[in-house]
Amino acid sequence: MSPTRDILCIGAGYIGGPTMAMIAYKCPLCTVTVVDIDPARIAQWNSDDLPIYEPGLEEIVKSVRGKNLFFSTDIEAGIKQSDIIFVSVNTPTKTFGAGAGMAADLQYWDKTAMQIRRCAESDKIIVEKSTLPVKTAQAMKQILTSGENGVHFDVLSNPEFLAEGSAIRDLENPDRVLIGSTQTPHGLKARDVLVEIYSTWVSKERIITSNIWSSELSKLVTNAFLAQRISSINAISAFCEKADADICEVAHAVGMDSRVGNKFLNASVGFGGSCFKKDILNLVYLCRYYELKEVADYWEAVIKINDYQKERFILKMLHVMFNTLVTKKICLFGFAFKADTGDTRESPAILIAKRLVEERAKVVITDPKALQNAMKDLASIDGEISYVEDPYEASAGSSAIAVITEWKLYTGLDFERIYRSMDKPAFIFDGRNILDHKKLFDIGFNVFPIGKPGLTHF
Ligand code: NAD
Ligand code: UGA
C-alpha cells in the first residue's frame, strides 16, 4: 500500500532524477517533485531527451511524469509544500582554500540547508541523499534550527548505493537501504516514515537502520572498499605483466574463495566516476582531521594505485609503439567511465586523451553515448582531437586502438575489417580485457591486454 506524502528532492542530477522517479513509480499516492537551480537540466527532465542516459530510466520517467512526478525550478514553492525533503545536490572535492583537493566542497549543500530554513513554514523531515562527510547531519540540524519560525526538522541519513549504468536495477532491487537517524523519539518516528516509503517495494530485511553517524560513514566506507578491490586487482595486474601470469586466471582463482567473492575483480585501465576518488579523498581528509595518519595513508594508497594504473597504460602505449606517438593516429574506444552511461566524470579517458595529445598523437574518440561530454571535457585541450560515432570510421587509418570503456558493442565488431583499414603495424591496447586477444593476434594485431603477456608479431 503506497503511503501518501509530499516529497521534494533538491538536486535533479544522476541521483535525484532516478531515485525520485523510482519512488514516484512505486508509490503512486506520493507526490514527488524534483527541483534544481539549473533550468536547462529541469527543461531536459521535462523533455523527450532526458539529461542522463540510464537503461530503463526513460520508460519509468515517462510513465509517471505529470502524474505524480514533477520537475521544477521553483525551489521555494517545493520546500513550502513538502513534508519530506531529499537533499541530493553535488558534493565534489573542494578545489580552493583549506582542504583543497581533499575535503568535500559543501557550498551547494550549505546553500540548500539555508534555503530550507528560510522557506519552511511547517515541520519537515530532511533526508541526506548526497554523500557527505561524517557529522554533516549535525551541521544540517544546526543550520535548520537557527531560525525562529518554530518549525521542527528531523534530519535523516539515507545514502544512495546505486551504480550508474545499472541505476534502475539497483533502485528496484537494492542490496540494502540504509537509514540513519538520531535515537530520540522524534528521530525514530521520522525514520519510520522513510522506512514505510521504501517498504512499498523493498523487503523489510533489506531496510537497515542505524545511528546517523554510522550511516554517513558506511557510505564513504562502502565506496572505499569497492575502489580498494579494483586497486588491489590492478596492482596485481602490474605484477602479472612482469611475471607472465594472467590476471583473469588469478582473479578467477582468488574470487572462487567464498570469503573473497568474485565480483568487482576486473582489472582495468583504472576506475573513474564522480564518486570513488572524491569519497576516498574525503575519508582520508577526515582521518587526518581526527589525527589517524596511518589510516589516512592506508586509504590514500587506493587512489595512488589508480593513478599508477592509468600512467602505466599510457607509458605502455608509448614504449611498445617505438617510444614515439608523434603524428600517429590513436583511436580511443569509449570515453565514458564505464559502460551503459554517458557520464565521463573522472573517466580515465580524460587523462589518457590529454597525455596522448601531449605526445603529439592525433586522437580520435568514439563512444555510443559520451561524445558530447567528451567534447566538453577536452574543450580546453590544444591538439588534434576528433569525435566520431562510428567505430569503423573512427579507427580507419589509425596506428592503435585503446579500449577504455567496456561497451558490449566493441566485442561484436568486425576486427578483420578494422585491421585492414588501419596503419601497420597495428596495435590494440585492451584496457578492459573484453576482446578475444588470440583472435586479434591471429588477424595481425599486436595486442596488449591488462595484466597478461602481450601478443606481438615482432
Ligand atoms: P549531479 O551533479 O549530477 O547533480 C547534482 C544537482 O544538484 C545538479 O543538477 C545541480 O545543479 C543541483 N544543485 C546544486 N546546488 C543546488 C541548490 N542549491 N539547489 C538546487 N539544486 C542544486 O550529482 P549526482 O551525481 O547526482 O550526485 C549527487 C550526490 O549523490 C553526491 O553527493 C554524490 O556523491 C551522491 N551519489 C552519487 C551517485 C552517482 O552514481 N552519481 C551515487 C551515489 C551517491
Ligand atoms: C559506485 C558504486 O558502485 C556505487 O555503489 C555507489 O553508489 C556509487 O559509486 C557512488 O557513490 O557514486 P559507479 O561509480 O556508478 O558506482 O560505478 P561502478 O560500477 O562502481 O564503477 C566505478 C568504476 O570502477 C568504473 O570506472 C568501472 O569501470 C571501474 N571498475 C568496476 C573496474 O575497473 N573494475 C571492476 O571490477 C569494477
Image: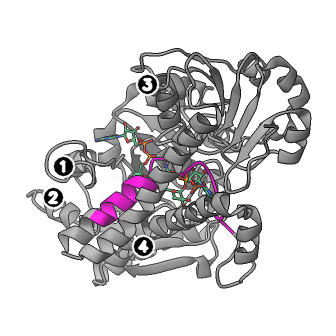
- Could you say which disc has been placed on residue 40 in the image? 3
Q: Name the residue under label 2.
A: 143
* Residue type marked 4: Ser
Q: Does the residue labelled 2 lie within 8 Å of ligand 1?
A: no
- For the residues marked 1 and 3, what is the alpha-carbon distance in whole angstroms? 23 Å
Q: Mark 1 points at which residue?
A: 114
Quarter of the image for the N terminus: give it.
bottom right
Q: Residue at x 31, y 49 (%)?
A: 93
* Residue 436 seen in render: no
Q: Name the residue under label 4.
A: 218
Query: Which of disc 4 and disc 1 is earlier in sequence?
Result: 1
Crowd class of label 2 (few under 14; some 14 to 19; many from 20; radius 10 Å): some
In this rendering, position of residue 371 left or right of residue 458: left
Query: Which of disc 4 and disc 2 is earlier in sequence?
Result: 2
Query: Which of disc 4 and disc 3 is earlier in sequence?
Result: 3
Query: Which of disc 3 and disc 1 is earlier in sequence?
Result: 3
- For the residues marked 2 and 1, what is the alpha-carbon distance in whole angstroms? 7 Å
Span of residues in magenta: 263-284
